Image (cartoon, rainbow, N blue to C red):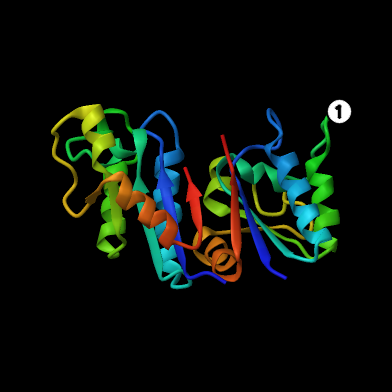
Amino acid sequence: MTDDLLTIITKQPYGSEDAFAGMRLALGNLVSGLVPEAAVLLIGDGTLNAVASQRSGVLGMPSNLEALQDLLDMDAPVYCVEDDLRERVGDVEALEGVTMVGWEGARELLSRHHMVTTF
Amino acid sequence: MGTLTIQIRSGTMMNMDTNVAVKLARAALDKGHGVKIFGYGEGVTLVKDGQDPKRFPNVGAELSELMSRGAEVIVCNTCTTARGIKRGEEIAGTAIGSITNDLSRFVSESDRMVTLAR
């Protein structure tokens, strides 16, 4: 039986539903109270979800930034592999509250959580 | 024995993910494990009643056998609504539920979760 879930997001914020769906899944688990720790780890193109200046309104799509903020507001830990983010967009501002980690930190998160799902 | 949750996010046609989910569920049941299947995104088509693929395995029909052996099958309400699948259109024994009430329970009651998606 499990009381923690790590949701890994590998997909970019827009162009597919995956990243938003993953954040909503993490939030739903957290809100239920049945899964006390529902953390999110952004890797690869998924790190783009943390870019603070994204403007989803241009596309008429739900805001992944707000979805991340909802998680942070619930005190869910949100981690981002910094190297992957910088490799894609350089030194841009990330959403406040997102914790930058290296790959060693990402591996530690993977080993610490009992259940992992990927979007 | 343990409990396995299978999170399926692919639809019933176009690829074999749902076939894999059914086979995986059957194998786990054969070994005496509990099985829970949660459909999310396109995966909600898993429970649509009346599936009738002419040349491919009928995954919907196979669900009934799995459930008769104790498997629990629930899909996301927001995702079914978005796709025009209404309550009452699901295969008997399956349920349209939610992440908050159902997937979270599956997670909390399971020892392992496998995610099938593209």
Q: Where in the figure is residue B110, as x and y percent of width and height?
A: 61, 66
Q: Chain of mark 1?
A: B
Can residue B84 be seen at all in this image of the molecule?
no
Point 51% across, 59% down: residue:
A115
In front here: A42 or B18? A42
Mark 1 sits on what residue?
B54
Secondary element at image label 1:
loop
Q: Residues within 10 Å of mark 1 (few under 14, many from 20)?
A: few
Which residue is found at the position 70% from the left and 37% from the top? B12
User: In the visual, does B10 lie left or right of A18?
Assistant: right
Instruction: Name the quadrant of the C terminus of chain B.
Output: top right
Query: Residue B117 location, x and y as percent?
Result: 58, 39
Measured as percent of width and height from the top left, residue A67 is found at: 32, 49
In the picture, residue B41 is in which quadrant? Answer: top right
Q: Is residue B91 above or below residue A64?
A: below
Specify whether B79 is left or right of A68.
right
